[in-house]
Image: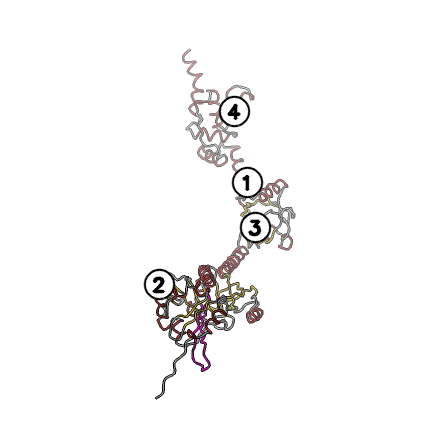
Amino acid sequence: MSTAPVLKSLRDSADLRHLRQIIAGLDEGVILVDPDQSILWANEAALGMHGVTAVEDLGANVDDYRRRFQLRYRNNHRLDRADYPIERVVSGEAFSEVVVEVAVAGEKDPRWVHQVRSLVLTNDADEPECLVMIIQDVSARYEAEDRFDQSFNANPAPAVICRLRDLRYVRVNQGFVDMTGHDRDTVLSSTVYDIDVLANGDKRDIGKRALAEGRTVPQMEAELDRPDGTTRLVIVAGQPIEIAEEPCMLFTFADLEPRRKAEAELRHSEERFTRTFSLAPVALAIGTLDGQRLCDVNEAFTSLTGYTPAEIVDGSLGHVDLWETPAIRHAIEADISAGRAIRDREVRVRPKDGDIIDCIVSTEPIQLGNDACVLWAMRDISTRKASERELVSAIDAVMKDTSWLSRSIMEKLARIRAPQSEPTGVGLDELTPREREVLALICRGLDDKSIARTLGVSGNTVRNHVARIYSKIGVNRRNAAAAWARARGFDGDSLLAQRAAAPAQRQTAA
C-alpha cells in the first residue's frame, strides 16, 4: 500500500529565517505564502503598501486577505475571487506586471495602485515549497498618468499619442476627433500607417525618420485626410514621451483650416476688387496711406489724366503736378496724412496735356492684405461746370435788360441766379418810406441814375439807400433785392402810383 507524498511546508524549514533576512530590506514588497494558503510573512515594504504594521493585519490566509482588501482593475472592474494575485500565486501560476487598485474593505475609493508579479520557490524534488508575491507601489506613477490624461483630454488643442514599438495610437483627445472627424475608437485601433498625421507634410521624410528613431519630429505643415474625403490643413509636431514606462510620441496640431479659408476668401475678394477696380468707369487710383506714392491706377484714371501707369505708378500725384495750384496739393496731402477722408471735394486738375479740368475728388482708407492704403476716386465735371457757367452768363445778360420780360419770368430768373435770396425774417416794415420807394424802382428795373432822376436826388444818395436796403434784407445784387420784394408780394406799382398822384391831389386841394 503506497502512501501519497506530503508537501513539506517552508514553515517547518530553517530556510524561512534566512529568506526573511534576505528580503527584509528590499524596496519591493514581498509576501510569502505557504502552499496551504496561509500567509507566512511580509517585509516592511509590503506592510506599508497595505497600510498595516504586522503580518497578522494582512490576514491569516488567502481568504482572510480577500476579506480585508478589495481589488479592482484600472477600468474599475472588480476582480473575481480567482483573479486575485494572491489566489493566482497559491495556484502556482507565474505572472508579471498585473496592475490592480487596492482599497481597504468598507472604503469606496482605492488607496494604492499595486503592480504585482509572482515567484514559486521549489524544493529539491521540484515541489512548491514557498509562494512569493512581489509588489511595487506604483500609485504615484498612475496618479501622474491620471493627471496627464485629464490634462490631455481637456486640452482643446488637437493631440494624439502613438506607442513607438508598434506605432499604434494609445491616446487621442476630443480636439483631434473634432478636427479630423475620425471616431475615437477608430483612432485607438489604428496605427500611424492607417491614419497618417504626417501626410503631405513639407518635411514628411524627415519626420518619418525622426519617428522611427524616437526623436523630436520637427514642426511642419501637413494635410490630414478626413473620413468624408476632404483634407485638413494643420501644423504638426512630435515630442517623445513615456507613458507607463513605454516610449511614445506625442503629436500636437495647430488647425490652419480657418486660416486657409480666410486666405481663400481674401484672395477671392481681392480678385473681385481688382476686376471692379480695373473696369470701373470712374477714375480710380490706389496709393499709400501718406499719399506720397501711387500703387495702381485703372484705365479710367489713365483716360482722365493722360498719364500711363508706367508714368505715374510709384510716384505721387504731386510729382506729376496734377493739381492746378500748390495750395490744392498741400490741402489734399494734409488731409490724407492726417487720416481724414475727402468727400466730393471740387478741385481743378491739370492733366498731362495741360488743359485744366474740373473734378470731384473723394478718398477712402482701405486695407489691401497687410497694407493700409487710400483709394482715390475722381470724376470729371468740366461739362457740368461749363453748362453752369454758360447758364449764369446767360442770366447775367438777361438781367441787364429786363424791360421786355414779364415780371414773373424775371423773378424766376432772379431766383435761379441768386438762390440765396430766399425770404428771411426781415419785413418791409423795417424799410423807411424812401427805401421802399427805391426798392419799388429797383423792381421796375431802373438803375441808380434813373432812380436818382425819378426821385430828384443825387446818385450818391441813391447808392446809400441801396446799400442800406441790401444790408437790411441780406442780399448784394439788384435782382436778388427784386426777388426778395416780390417774394413778399411787393412790386412797388401801388407805391409809385400813390407818389405820382400826390401833386394832383395837392393842386385840387389848393
Whether residue 391 is visible to the viewer of this picture, yes or no, is yes
State the mark number for residue 389.
1
Q: Which residue is mark 3?
A: 372
Q: Is residue 394 magenta?
A: no
Is label 2 or label 3 in front?
2
The three-letter code of the residue at mark 3 reads Ala
Q: Position of residue 28 (x, y in %)?
A: 48, 67
First reached walking from the N terminus: tag 2 or tag 3: 2
Is label 1 or label 2 in front?
2
Main secondary-structure element of the magenta-colored stretch: strand
Disc 2 to disc 3, C-alpha distance: 73 Å
Q: Is residue 118 magenta?
A: yes
Secondary structure state at the residue bearing disc 2: loop
Secondary structure state at the residue bearing disc 3: strand
For the N terminus, give its image quadrant: bottom left
Is label 3 or label 1 in front?
3
Q: Is residue 233 left or right of residue 79?
A: right
Q: Which residue is mark 4?
A: 466
Q: Nearer the viewer, residue 16 or 470?
A: 16
The three-letter code of the residue at mark 4 reads Val
Q: Is residue 499 above or below residue 61?
A: above
Whether residue 179 is visible to the viewer of this picture, yes or no, is no
Q: Which residues are magenta?
A: 115-137
Q: Is residue 319 above or below residue 467?
A: below
Secondary structure state at the residue bearing disc 1: helix
Secondary structure state at the residue bearing disc 4: helix
Q: Which residue is mark 2?
A: 105
Circle 4 Cα neighbour tier, 10 Å, few/some/many (<14 / 14–19 / ≥20): many
First reached walking from the N terminus: tag 1 or tag 2: 2
